[in-house]
Amino acid sequence: STQSTGSSGINAEYGKQWYQRRVRGHFVRSLSLQLPSIREPVQMTSAYSSNLPSYGSKRDVGKALLQTLGAPSNSVRDRKAPEHWNAALNMHVRLSDKDKNKAETQREASNRLIKDLDQKTKSKQAEINRQLQDRITTVAYWKQRLTTEHAAICQEITNLTMSKQKTQQALASTELPTEVSTNCLKNRENREAIDLVQDLVDDELINELNMLSEVQKLLATRINDSDHRLRVLNDCKSCLEYDIRDKEECLRLDEHCYKLNNGSAGLQQIAQPSLYDGHTSTVEKHESFSQENLEKSEIARVMSCLQRELNDFSINKSNDELQKQSELVGSMFRLRLKELTDAKTGLDGQLEKTNQEISSVEDSLHQLREALRSKDGPMKVATTRFAVRAKRPNVEQTRDYVHGGLLSEINDISGSQEALKQQIASAEETLHRLLKNKERLQQDIAIKKKEYPD
């Protein structure tokens, strides 16, 4: 504004000087052309002098000269004073400076507005990107927890299924002692005369049958409870799988949104984004939903673990009680039948142990085969990576640490598979021997029964 004021003053002074020079030049030219020489005396007639009025200023003299020299009437116009001209000039300059300053101010305000709005838009977009990143991290965290819980519950389902199978095998293993005790009582009914007595052997056989009946009911209850727990586990597993699929889809969409920018293709403008908010849920509801699924799954796993422990406890306790009862019956048989009864009781006990060992070896063999099958996935991944990396062009086909790591991984997995195969072969051989032993024991018992019936 100071520069504008100074410029206005200079322009006004310059205009004033220019106007004075112009007036003086015009006045001198007029005198030199139409008046007598100033060196000669001017002889004024009475008529000429009578027409000259008295002048009070140079401007009045100029007007009088123009009128006297016969200037056209239309050329005599209303002349403006220099003060008016200077005022008009200064006003125009001030108005011009004012409009220019106003335009500059408006232009600066427009630039500031554009810059501020652009910065605000960029900041908001950066904030949304950060929020998307945070959301992706949160959803990934919940997905990881759900995936971990899903793996845990799958493992628990496998464990409970094995426990159920073990319980079923234990229940099935009671059929033989029941049959044996029943047959013993029936065979002892074939005794004649004085041998047909109600001795301690008969009493203990009856007790054993009652105990086996109670054990069968208990194991059947444990199997039913295991079925119920498996249904609950499978329901929780389905909920986790649905939640994981939703999380994966959410991650895919949020990651797609995170990668979008102003230059991305396929962008579209939604007229009313609020219309899309009717089906949304709150963050708390989202987290509570997953948390509830996790808690339900954890509770189901805990209950399943308790069920497995209860199954094992029932099996072990039943086996212990049955074993004790069997030993008691055997002792009674030893007292009653001496060596023959002792031999038969020993064979029965050995057969039961063989059956239990066969069940254990079969379980171990099943676990070994499952472990061998579990190595197929890592082996396929490692060999596929090795084959894909083998397609690298030219000098990129290097023996880097990844190459060495893959070779080491393949060798380790191959070694693990070989060790598992050897262990499986050994277990199968052991199972074959046990089956042979069981067959021999059963044959021996059958021979003893035929040769020495009770």
Image (cartoon, rainbow, N blue to C red):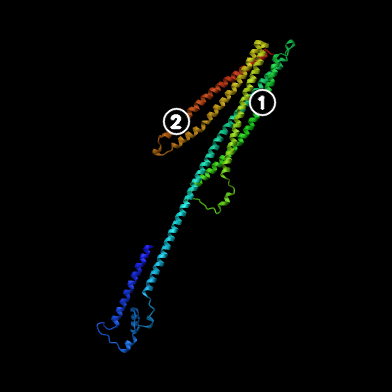
Quarter where residue 398 is shown: top left
* Residues tagged 1 and 2 counted as in contact (Cβ below 8 A): no
On the image, the x and y values in percent for residue 86 come to: 37, 71
On the image, the x and y values in percent for residue 110 come to: 45, 58
State the quadrant of the C terminus: top right
Residue at the disc numbered 2: 408
State the quadrant of the N terminus: bottom left
Q: CA distance from mark 1 to mark 2?
A: 51 Å
Q: Do we see residue 125 in this rendering?
A: yes
Q: Which is nearer the eye, 349 or 125?
A: 125
Q: Nearer the viewer, mark 1 or mark 2?
A: 1
* Amino acid under disc 2: Ser
Left or right? Give the position of 64 relative to 354: left
On the image, the x and y values in percent for residue 58 come to: 33, 79
Placement of 1 over or under 394, stated as above or below:
below
Quarter where residue 2 is shown: bottom left
Q: Which is nearer the eye, 264 or 331?
A: 331
Q: Residue at x 63, y 15 (%)?
A: 346
Spot the residue most to the left: 39
Q: Residue at x 52, y 39 (%)?
A: 141
Q: N-terminal of the two: label 1 or label 2?
A: 1
Q: Residue at x 66, y 10 (%)?
A: 338
Task: Provide the secondary structure element on which disc 2 rests.
Answer: helix
On the image, the x and y values in percent for residue 286 come to: 57, 43
Residue at the disc numbered 1: 218
Q: Residue at x 56, y 25 (%)?
A: 365
Task: Provide the secondary structure element on which disc 1 rests.
Answer: helix
